[in-house]
Amino acid sequence: MSGTEADPTVRHRLYTVLAERTASGSLPGARADGHRVALAIEGGGMRGTVSAGMALAVHELGLLPAFDAVYGASAGAISSTWLLSSRPEGLRGWTDPAFAKALIRRRNVLRGRPLVDVRQLVEVVYRQVFPLDFASVLANPIELHPLATDVLTGEATDLHAELVDEATLRLAMRASAALPLLAGGPVTVGGRRYFDAGVAESIPFRQALRDGATHVLVLRSRRRSDSDSNRDNNNSNNSNSSNDNRDSDGATNHHVPSRGTRLVANLGLRPHTPQLRAAFLARDTRLAEDDRLLTHHDRDADPTAPAILSIRPPDDSPYVSRLESGGDLLHTAFETGRETARALMSGALKQQSEG
């Protein structure tokens, strides 16, 4: 979505509830409308800079109090934590090259250490260099739901119940972004071990629905063309496979894993359970299904279904890789996400108030 003039989503039921709650001054924990409204933030390594910009737009537009819960996957869990802190402007840290330098430590490969050092970022940078007010997050009446992937079952797990103090909050952030192979071993939270949420649930809207959400705003880090090109690359790499089937709408419903995915599964995940490896190998198939389902929900054609709306960066915006560290590109990506979300939401809410 790139505008509001001819965009049918401006009448989406999600905007109606956001407008009503904002106008009435409704606050989390004291609702009277019977809805549960969730914000879901996609990650994707440094590509999460895009959805972080969108999250800041939610704050700047004064919409955050209209949400009951925020769900984050991987880098989206880090952004969710900043958003619910006393200083949501800290989301701009994604644009700082020092942030990328702390997270992506290429020399670590020569030292046998993790390439992506989430522990350094959360336990050192966010406590000593660029402090995050963890106590304010725990005190926020808006629920934080960081997702991770259970190493034993390969299933997405909501770590909300584990957030009992600042230490477990930091562990949950690390667990949600603990990339297999790239970021070292799994993180233990509450006696169980976890890897990156993206192994099982890259876009954390399904957990919001499992928790009873009636309305979900999904902040995407991937451009639509990114998902399409990934599927095209997988299909071309496996063009003779009989496993690549399409449904009646032409959407791919099964994907043979790429060579890189198989390599990580066979080498990086070899010590772990078959369930975890199976979940990792099925990521592309799940992402394609999520894309199809979210596109369907954007139309808001079924008034009996949950109202789910996605905001994605424009297809002509710059591509951001998972390991991007260039300050100029990260700044552009953040502002692209921020301005895209601001334009869409402010325009839609204005039409709601005038209609």
Image (cartoon, rainbow, N blue to C red):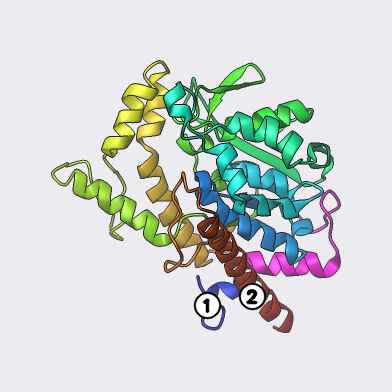
Judging by the rendered image, the residue that carries numbered circle 1 is 7
Using the image as rendered, state which of residue 221 and residue 322 is in the foreground.
Answer: 322
Q: Is residue 251 magenta?
A: no
Q: Which SS class for mark 1?
A: loop
Tags 1 and 2 touching, CB below 8 Å: yes
Which residue is rendered at x = 35% and y = 33% of the image?
281
Judging by the rendered image, the residue that carries numbered circle 2 is 348
**Residue 260 image point, x, y percent:** 31, 36
Left or right position of 244 against 207 = left
Left or right position of 349 against 27 = left
Which residue is rendered at x = 74% and y = 30% of the image?
163
Left or right position of 284 against 337 = left
Q: Amino acid at mark 1?
A: Asp
Q: Amino acid at mark 2?
A: Ala
**Residue 46 image point, x, y percent:** 52, 47
* Start-end of magenta stretch: 12-33
Q: Which SS class for mark 2?
A: helix
Which residue is rendered at x = 40% and y = 15% of the image?
271
Residue 192 appears anywhere in the view: yes
Using the image as rendered, state which of residue 86 and residue 33 is in the foreground.
Answer: 86
Residue 338, image quadrant: bottom right
**Residue 73 image point, x, y percent:** 57, 42
**Above or below, comparing residue 133 to residue 305 in the picture:** above
**Above or below, comparing residue 63 to residue 238 in the picture:** below
Using the image as rendered, state which of residue 90 and residue 81 is in the foreground.
Answer: 90
Whole-angstrom CA distance, mark 1 to mark 2, is 9 Å
